Amino acid sequence: MKKPLLASGIPCLLTFAFSASASADTAVKIGHVAPLTGAIAHLGKDNENGARLAIEEINAKGLRINGETVRLELDPQDDAADPRTATQVAQRLVDDRVVAVVGHMNSGTSIPASKIYSDANIVQISPSATNPTYTLQGFKTTYRMVATDAQQGPALAAYARNKLKVSTVAIVDDSTAYGQGLANEFEKAAKAAGMTVLSHDATNDKAIDFRAILTKIKGENPDAVMYGGMDATGGPFTKQAKDLSVRAKVLGGDGLCSEKLADLAGAAVNNVICSEAGTALESMPGGSAFQAKFQKRFGQPIQLYAPFTYDAVYIIVDAMKRANSVDAAKIVAAMPSVVYRGVVGETSFDSRGDLKHGVISLYGYKDSKRSLIEAERM
């Protein structure tokens, strides 16, 4: 009597095991890297939140690749804006078997990390690295969501010359790959436009006291001072310039051009003109809707590049769908043919991994609020 019971029970057990296996999701990790500690952690967390929001949405809607249900997992890492840490974090993500990486935030961390991702054949999409070197290394895994400093520097210089009527300029950079790279591109374009560069000084990305440099610049009496660096140092730089009665306009790039700059620079922020290597949030096709759901989810406004990290995750998923695979190598193979329409507009890449249609947006501050002046399509 027992044998029939055992025999009839085996199919039930097999059916249960099969059902449990079939219903299990395939977990797929996407890495994200930005500085989550240190002076620019607010920008890094903003980027991470953009990526996290995309992953939460995709999981809520449901994702199927090659007939299997896929659940995305964000693997967030902190590179502290430090190049050496960036390479360690990159190797950690390779070891974690991520299928792609959104990051790093800074040029100085994106560039050294890119070789590690290239060697592992893993797609890397930086939402904000602007140094041209990043995509000039010949890696087929390397992409960026923004224009380059070879475009941003000239756009800022052209505005200074043509609209602000700047004739003389002093330049200061923070000695990072980003700050120095942007300052050098600006300097070349400024000279080509007929401006006189009175000086080019270097500080560092940990500096808090700029009075010695600014006192020298005050004696030079330039029409404008161009600062190549991030808001964490650019804010105090701008405030101290006002305190020392430096009459010049302060010009800066996207690292300076954040919502938090007003808190860091105080009333002096109204003297800043800055550029962003991407479409302004208010000009993005999906900007207002994204801003509303970002604010609802995280309880704070967008700082800078969260829309780009958000779209970068969707671009990776788009490549998965077209490859019909979650294999990292197949995602790499699908990336060159990306044509994705998302929050920031249409994204497609050239053979180097740069945008085919970059945009430079120029901003000013009035009553401590950032406002778009104009945008230039590259």
Image (cartoon, rainbow, N blue to C red):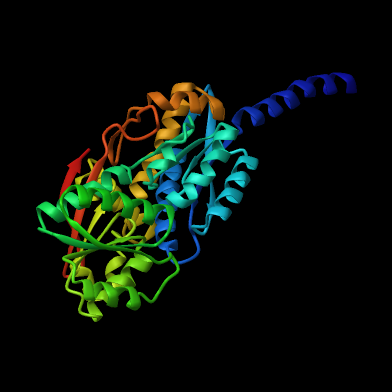
Q: Quadrant of the N terminus?
A: top right
In this orientation, does residue 47 appear? yes
Residue at 9% across, 58% down? 165
Residue at 38% across, 42% down? 132
Indicate whether 119 appears above or below 36: above
Looking at the rendered structure, the number of numbered marks drawn on it comes to 0
| Along the line of sight, the residue nearer the viewer: 23 or 7 | 23
**x, y percentage for residue 137?**
47, 35
In this orientation, does residue 25 appear? no
Query: In the figure, is residue 204 to the left or right of 10?
Result: left
Residue at 40% across, 36% down? 314
Indicate whether 108 appears above or below 377: below
**x, y percentage for residue 77?**
54, 52
**x, y percentage for residue 250?**
22, 65
Which quarter of the picture shows residue 99? top right
Query: In the figure, is residue 265 to the left or right of 371?
Result: right
Q: Quadrant of the C terminus?
A: top left
**x, y percentage for residue 85?**
57, 55
Which quarter of the picture shows residue 359? top left
| Along the line of sight, the residue nearer the viewer: 61 or 92 | 92
| Along the line of sight, the residue nearer the viewer: 113 or 294 | 113
